Amino acid sequence: MLPLSSEPPIAMLSKVLKRRGATLALNGLDLAIQPGQCVALLGPNGAGKSTSVALLTGRLRPEAGEAFLFGGDPRALAGRGRMGVMLQTAGLPNTLSVREQIDLFRGYYRKPRSLDEVVRLAGLEGLEKRRCGALSGGQQRRVQFALAIAGRPDFLVLDEPTTGMDIDARRALWSAVRSEIARGCAVLLTTHHLDEAEALADRIVVIDHGQVIADGTPEAIKARVSGVAIRCRTCLSDAELASLARVTGVSRDGGKVTLLTTSAPATLRELLARDETVDDLIVSGASLEDAVTRLVQAGQAAALQRQTEAA
């Protein structure tokens, strides 16, 4: 856990319980976001990320515990006017041009950015007259980012912001987000792109089953798992791979496997001895994605063990 800041948090969840149907989406979750801080909220599908975002933006209310935005109710107009939100599933009106849509949205705020500034920050130069319905998926995401920053927010929520964007557009958005952070804006980021979280966030919060299982800087999160990753294609099963010397974690992505190990030489010797067909072999330091995967696996294994003991 990172040390507490002396500044009051921009947004906070305290001991929150929230159900989605019969499922307990959040189970006593604590989360506080300070001014000028970018927090990446990570975890598997169903971990509680979307529910957390919905509570902090006032779209849901907790069943127990409290949610705060600028010290008050997230549904209050005063707080919502200081927030910018880019949701994963938000749509745009097909018939309005990019310029018309941004100009309309700017009118909702007391002290908005100028139209030209919003267009520049969102990388929309040359697209101002195009109708939103004629934009590509990545271009629509850039318009949605423009709407999120139009009011010069003090709290910016980015839910999978770069989905559908090409590399240049992603990096341009990252640059704009860094500018928002530099002026003191607090940012809550959810993303499945772990390189994005590492590039933007100074704090990583990993949740699973509605609870925080890790909280720290990207470097601190990576330090919690073994420091070397071996990636390859192999015919060995997960059980066989887990039994290799010094292996602490096994995960798969398609046909490739990642082994986390405390000693690459010891693991490689056994791996190559057991499977002479190993291919696409890469050895590198453990990434943030490796660390998050391992932490979630360890948490799920511990939860399963508790259920078994209780039965």
Image (cartoon, rainbow, N blue to C red):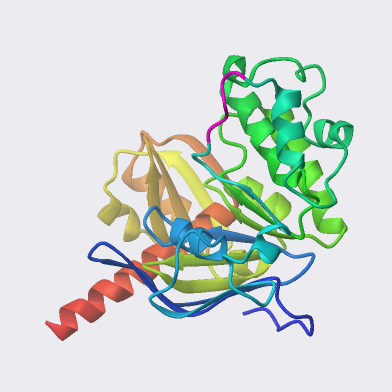
Q: Nearer the viewer, residue 2 or 284?
A: 2
Asked if residue 287 can be seen in this view, the reply is no
Q: Is residue 96 above or below residue 62?
A: above
Q: Judge left or right: residue 108 versus residue 48.
A: right
Q: Quadrant of residue 60 in the image?
A: bottom left
Residue 171 in the image: state x and y as whole percent.
74, 36
Q: Residue at x 88, y 36 (%)?
A: 117
Q: Point out the image quarter for the N terminus.
A: bottom right
Image-based side of 6 in relation to 78, left or right: right
Q: What number of labels is visible?
A: 0
Q: Residue at x 53, y 62 (%)?
A: 58
Is residue 103 something that shows in the picture? yes
Residue 57 counted in the magenta span: no
Please report the residue visible at 50 percent of the width from the left and 38 percent of the height from the top: 281
User: How would you classify the magenta stretch by its main secondary structure?
Assistant: loop
Please tell me which residue lies in front, 111 or 227. Answer: 111
Specify the quadrant of the image occupied by residue 141. Answer: top right
The quadrant of the image that shows the C terminus is bottom left
The location of residue 126, given as percent across then percent down, is 81, 16
What is the x, y in percent for residue 161? 61, 42
Q: For the magenta stretch, what is the residue range?
A: 91-95
